[in-house]
Amino acid sequence: MANFIERMCLYLVLVLSVFLSIIQAVDRSNFKTCDQSAFCSRQRAMKPGQSSYRALLETLELSDSHLTVQLLNNNNKVLLLLELYRLQGNMTRVKINELKPVKPRYEVPDVLITDPPTELMSVVAQDEHRVVLSLGGEDWRLILSAQPFRLDIMEGPQVLLSLNSRGLLAFEQLRIRKDTKSQTDTKEAGEKEDTEKHDKEKVSEGEEAEEEVDQPGMWEETFKTHADTKPNGPSSISLDFSLPGVEHVYGIPEHADGLRLKNTDGGDPYRLYNLDVFQYELFNPMALYGAVPVLLSHNTHRTMGLFWLNAAETWVDVSSGQGSSEVPQTDVRWISESGIIDVFIMLGPRPNDVFTQYASLTGTQAFPPLSSLAYHQCRWNYNDQEDVSAVDQGFDEHDIPYDFIWLDIEHTDGKRYFTWDNNKFPQPKDMLQGLLDKRRKMVTIVDPHIKVDSSYKIHTEIRSRGYYIKNKDGGDYEGWCWPGNAGYPDFTNPEMRKWWASMFAYGQYEGSMENLYTWNDMNEPSVFNGPEVTMHKDALHGPWEHRDVHNLYGFYVQMATAEGQIQRSGGLERPFVLTRAFFAGSQRYGAVWTGDNAAEWGHLKMSIPMCLSLGLVGISFCGADVGGFFKTPSAELLVRWYQAGAYQPFFRAHAHLDTPRREPWLFGPDNTALIREAVRQRYTLLPYWYLQFYHAQRTGQPVMRPLWVEYPEDIATFSIDDEFLIGRDLLVHPVTDERSSGVTAYLPGNGEVWYDVHTFQRHDGAQNLSIPVTMSSIPVFQRGGSIICRKNRVRRSSSCMENDPYTLYVALDSQGNAEGELYIDDGHTFKHETDKQFIHRRLSFTANSLSSSDLSPDSQFPSASWVEQVNILGAQKPDAVTLTTTDGGESSVEFAFDPDTAVLTLRKPGMNAGVNWTLHLR
Amino acid sequence: MSCALLLLLMSLALAMGTGAAVEIQRPRGVPLSKRQFYEENKPFTCLDGSSTIPFDRINDDYCDCRDGSDEPGTAACPNGSFHCTNAGFRPAFIPSSRINDGICDCCDTTDEYNSGATCQNTCREMGRKERESLQIMAEITKEGFMLKQQLIHEAKRGQEDKQGKLTELQGSKKGLEEKVEALRTVKETAEDPEKEAKERHLKSWEEQKELIRMEKDKTRMAEAFLELDDDADGYVSVAELQSHLELDPDSDGSLTETETQGLLGGADKVDTSTFETVWSGIKDKYLSEGLSDPPAPVETPQEEETRDFVSDPDSDHYPEDYAGEEEDVEDDEEDDHEEEEEEKVPPTVQTPEKRADDEVSMPPYDTETQSLIDAAQKARDDFDEAERALREVDDQMKNLEKEIGFDFGPSAEFAYLYSQCYELSTSEYIYRLCPFNRVSQKPKFGGSETNLGLWGQWAGPEDSLYSVMKYDHGQGCWQGPNRSTTVKLTCGKETVVTSTSEPSRCEYLMEFTTPAVCQEPASLDEVLQGHTEL
C-alpha cells in the first residue's frame, strides 16, 4: 500500500514544483510577499500625505437611511461615490465605489445575513469645508471634511477613529486598455511614482484629466511560472484608518501569530488570501487557509471593530506608535486587489457590544450537535472497515470515550468524493451501523476538487450542467489536486450549491447514513499546480474573476455542504461540517480547524492565539489537530496536547499518513491513563460547553475568549495568549512546555476569587499564580461567583450520557454569591428553534439559598436528567439543608463539609433538572 | 493458549450447569465471589475500607465509596465495575459506565435494565458458538501440537544431519587447506624465475624505449632550433627566443631580455651544440611556433597540472604498477577475479606524448621466458582451482553454521520454516514471507518487489517470545522510516500467511499460522485446579 502512495507522491513531487520542499518547513518562495504582488507594492509605495481626494459637498444628498456625496480625485478627475450609513446597534458603514465604473465592480454577496437596518442621520452643522452629522446620543458625531477628504468619528471632543486621515485612500478606477499605449509601457514603467504625481498636479489645473501612466503589473503579472492575465487591468483599492489612544489591535485571522497584532512597519503586511500553505511557519504574517477581514481595537475605555467587506486578496498594515500630542495611536491600512470599499465601523464600546454588532452583520456561530463538542478521532487514514472497527474497539477496551471517527481521502474510490473504496470499505452502511449501535458517528472527507473522469457521475453532472469554474478562455478550469486532474465547481453559483447540497441525500451519497457527517478540506481552493498552490486569478465565476471572489470560495463550499446535511434530514437535524478555508460569516456553517500544523511544542502553544483570534471574529468552533499533523509527537507532547485540546472548542486528534500510529493507548499504560483523564474531563464539562455554544449562537460572544474580553480595563490581560477563558467562568492555562515543572497563570479580577477545579483551592484574582505541575496537571480555574453544571458519569460517547444526572459546582464569590445557567435540549435537532423544545434555567446562589428558575418559560423539554450532587466551593458548614420544590414539598438533604477545602457537598438532592427548586442552607 | 481455551470451555460448561439452576440473592452487579461483602441489611464497608454506609445506599444511584464498590449495579461511580453472570456464556465485568447506556454489553441483557434498550439474551447462542469455535480450536491445537512434535523430531534429525555434514566438511577442509598450501609453494617456486625473466625482458625494453625517446627529443630539439633561428644564422639569439612567452620563468606575462639570457645560459646567442643544454631547460614548456596561440598566463593552475603530468618520468609508472599487480594477487587471496581485472586497467589520464610512446608496443617474450611464464601460469591456475574448492567448502560450512546457530525455538520447532517462503495474494499485492530471511511485497499487476524487512529477531512478550517475529531494515520509505514487518504466529495445522495489513505507514503486520506455536493441551487436572473460583 505504501508503495502506491509513495509512487503517487513521488510523481507529484516531480511534476509539481509546489511540493518540492516536503521535508523542510514552508517554502516561502512559493508564496508572494507584498513586493511580489503588483497591486500591493503599488499601493504600499504610496506614502502618507495629503489625500488627492476632495469631497464635493455640493453633491451631498441625505436621505432617511443614508448620505451620499461624490469624491473627486484631483489628479485624474475620476469621481467616486461615498455612501455613509448609520446602522442600528452603534455602527457606521462607509461604502466607496466609482461613480460611473466602465463595468460593475464586485460587491460581496451572501456574507451579510440581512441588509443591515439603518437609523436616521441628521446634519448638525455644515459649511463649505465640512459637514457634521449626528450619530445619535448626546455627543456622537461624524465629521466629513471636504479638502482633503476625511472622516472623523467623535465622541464629545474625542476622536475615536479617523478615515483617510493619512491620505491613503486610493481607488484604481476600471479602464479600457489602450493598445496604442502599450508600446510605451515598458519605457515609462520604470519611472518613479513621485515624478508622476508631480506631473499630474501640474496638469490637473486644466479641465482635462491627464493621461495616466500604466505601471508594471497593471495589465499582466507573472509569479514564478504563472502568468496572471489581467483583462480588466488595475482595480485595487486602499484606505487608512487611525485609532487614537489605541495600542492593542487584534483579529484579521488566519495567521500563525500571537493574539495581539504586531507592527508591520519594515516587514510584510498581514496578508488575507486563502492558501494551502505546506508546513506553515509560526510568528509570521503570511496568509493561511482562511481570511476574516475584521480587526478589533481595544483600550481600557473602548473596544471597536473594523469589518472590511472584501473577498479579494487583501493586505493589512498595522502601525502602532505615538500619534500627535504623545497619545498612543494605531494606524491601520487595508489594501485589496479588486472590489469596492465597504467597511463597517463597529463602535462598541464594550467588547461584547462589538461581538453583538458583528454578529448582527454576519450572523452567529451555528449551534452544533452536542456530540460534535465531544472528542473526535481522526487519522490520514483509517485504512479499512476492519481498521475502523479495531480502533472503535480500542477505545472501549481502554475505556476512553469518543464520539466521532474520521475518514480522510483514502476511503474514496480514487479520490472521487461521495464514493467508497470498494476493497477497503465494501460495506459502509454496516460500518456506520456498527458505530450507530454504539451511539457513535463518522465523518468522511468531501473536498471541492472533482476528478475529471467521464465515468464519475459527480464530474459528468457538473460538467454537463456547466457548473465548473471556467478558465480565462472559457473552458472548464482544470488543476491538479489529490485525484490528479480535477475540476472546481463554481460554488459562488447558487444553482451549483443547490445541486451540491442535493448530493448529500441518502439516496445520492451511497453508503451514507444519518450518523455520517462531512469534512471540507482543500477549499482555499488548493490547486497543486496553480500560482501559490491555488487557483489562477483570471479564472471565471460567471461574470466575475476568481480574483474578486477568492476568499469566499471555502465559505461557499461549507455553506452548500451544511445545507446538504440539513436537507437530507428534511430540515430536522443540525449539520456538522468542518472546513479548512473560511471567510467572514463562515461561523454560520460549522467548525474550523487550524490546518496542517506540526507535532512541535511551538505549534501546541500557537493553537491558543490562533483559536482566540478566530473567536474574536465570530468563529468560535475552532480547534487544532491534537498531536500535530506533520511529524511525530513525543508521548509527552501528545499528552500535553490532549490536555490542552480537551479545553479548546473543537477537539480532534489527527495525524499525517507518514507518521506512526498514535491512538491514545499506544504509549504505555501511564500515558493512556493521562489521555483518558484529559478526555474524560472534556466529557464531564460537555453541558458547560454546550451552554457556551448556545450563548454563542444567540449572542455572538466567543466561546474561547482572551482574558481582556472579560477584563477590558485590566491592562495586564491585553497581551496574554498562553491562557484563555471558556465562556466567562473557566480559566485555562494549558501546559505547553516540554518537561515543565510549573506554569504561571494570571488570575484576573481585582476582588475576585478563583477555584482550582481539581483541588478546589481558592486563589485571589489580580495575581500571577505559580502553579507546580506534573504530567497529570491541567491548570483550570472556576471563577468565584459562577455555577457550572457537569455530568460526571462519563460514558463511551456523549449520546450515552444524555439522561445522566448533573453535578453542580457552585463557586462562591467574595460576597458569597454565585450564578450560572443550564441549557438542555435533544442535542441534535432544530426543535429547540422550531418547537421551542429546550430547557434554559438560571441557577443562582444568594443569601445561602441555591435556586433554579426558568429563563424561558414558554419552552418545554422533557429531560430525564436530575441533580445528583451539589458542591459549594468556598462554603461554610450549615446546620441543615432543605430542598423546596414548586409543588410545595420540602425535604431535608444530607450533606458533608470538608473544612480543609471549604467544600460543602449536598448528597443526592435528586430534583429533575427541568423544574424550579430551592436548596436552603441554614 | 490451549490451556486458556480449555479453561474457558470448562468454565462455560460449569456456568451452564449451575447458573440457571441456582440464583443466589445479591446486589445487582456483584459477582458471586464478592457476595459475602454485601450482607443484607447490615452496614456496608466500602471494599477499600474508606467508609461505611447503610445497606440501602448500595446501588441507590449515588456514589458513596471512593472505589465505587457501593454502586456495582449503577453507573453512579466513575470507577465502578458491573458483573454480568451471562448464564450460558462466560461471565464478565464491564465498566459501570456501560450500565443503562442504551448499548447491550452483557449477553444476558442485565446491564440494560432501565435504559429502554431492547436487548436479546444471546448468551446461549454465544456460548454455543464459542464452544464450537473453542472445540475447533482445541482440535486444531491438539493436531497442531502433534504436528509440532513431528517438526521437533525432524528438526532434531535435521540438526544432526547438518552437524554431521559440518564435521565432514571440516575434515575435507583440512585436506583442501593442505593442498592449497602445497600448490602455493609450487606456484611461488615457478613464479620467481618467471619474474626475473620478465624483469629482464622489461628492462631491455625500457632501455630501448629510452633510446627511442632520446632520439625523438633530439629531433624535436633540432626542429626547435631551426624554428627559433629565424635569421638562419646558425644561432638562436635572445631576440629570437624572446617571442616565446610560455618560457617566462616568473610567469608574469613578459619575457624580459635578462630572463631570456638566463634561459640561454647567460649568452646572447647559442649555436646548435650549446642549444642542447638550453633545450633541456625549456623543452617542457616550449611550444612549437607551428601550434596555435600560447596558453594565456592566467590559467596558471591548469598549466601546473599539465606540467605535473608531463614532468612525471614515464619510467615511474609502468614497472611499479606491474609489480603492484603481482603483489596484489598474492596478498589478497580473498579477492575475486573481477576485482583483479579492474586493477589491471591502465590509468585513464594520459598526456598525448605518452600515448605516442605507447604506440610502440613491447616486443614478444623470447621462448625461454615464455616457457617460464607458461609454467608459472599453470601453477597459478592449479593454485586458484584449489583455493576455489576451499572457498566453496568454507561457504558451505558458514551456511551450515549459520543455520545451526539460528534460534529456531526452544525445540527447534521452527527450523522447518528455514529457506521456505509463504505467499499471500491480496487485491493489489502478493506478499511473501520467507521466515528467518525476509518479507517482501510485489504489485500484482507489474512493478518491482519491495523489501518489507529482513529477519530481525523474535519479538513476542516475555512469556511467549516465540509468538512474534520482527523483520526490519526493509526498503526505506519516502518521508518515513525503513519498512518493517511484525509477524504474529498463531497455532494452526497448516503453515500459511492468513492476513497482512499496514497499520502505520511502512509498518506492516502479518498473521501467520504454524503448528510450531501450538502449545500442549493442558491436562484435565490442571483445568479443574485452576477453576476453584466458580
Image (spheres, coloured by chain):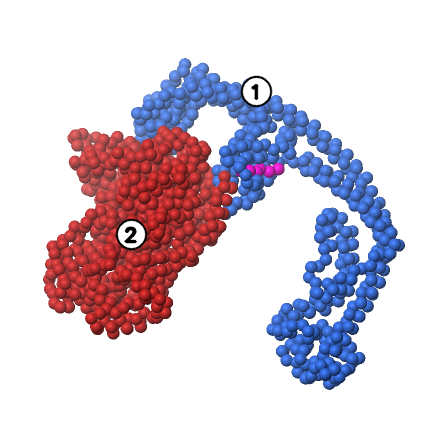
Q: To which chain does the residue with label 2 belong? A: A
What span is colored magenta in the figure?
Answer: B437-443
Relative placement, left or right, of A815 versus B107 is left
Q: Colour of chain A?
A: red
**Secondary structure beneath disc 2?**
strand
The residue that disc 2 covers is A544
Q: Residue B439: within the magenta? A: yes
Q: Nearer the viewer, mark 1 or mark 2?
A: 2
Q: Is residue A271 above or below residue B6?
A: below
Residue A354 point in image, percent of width and height: 23, 52
Camera-side residue: B186 or B463?
Answer: B186
Residue drawn 64% across the image and 30% down it: B416
Which label belongs to residue B523? Answer: 1
Identify which amino acid the numbered label 2 is placed on. Answer: Trp
Residue B385 is at least partly visible in this image: yes
Q: Which secondary structure is most common in the magenta stretch?
A: strand
Q: Residue A125: within the magenta? A: no
Q: Quadrant of residue A835?
A: top left
Residue drawn 62% across the image and 24% down it: B147
Residue B49 is at least partly visible in this image: no
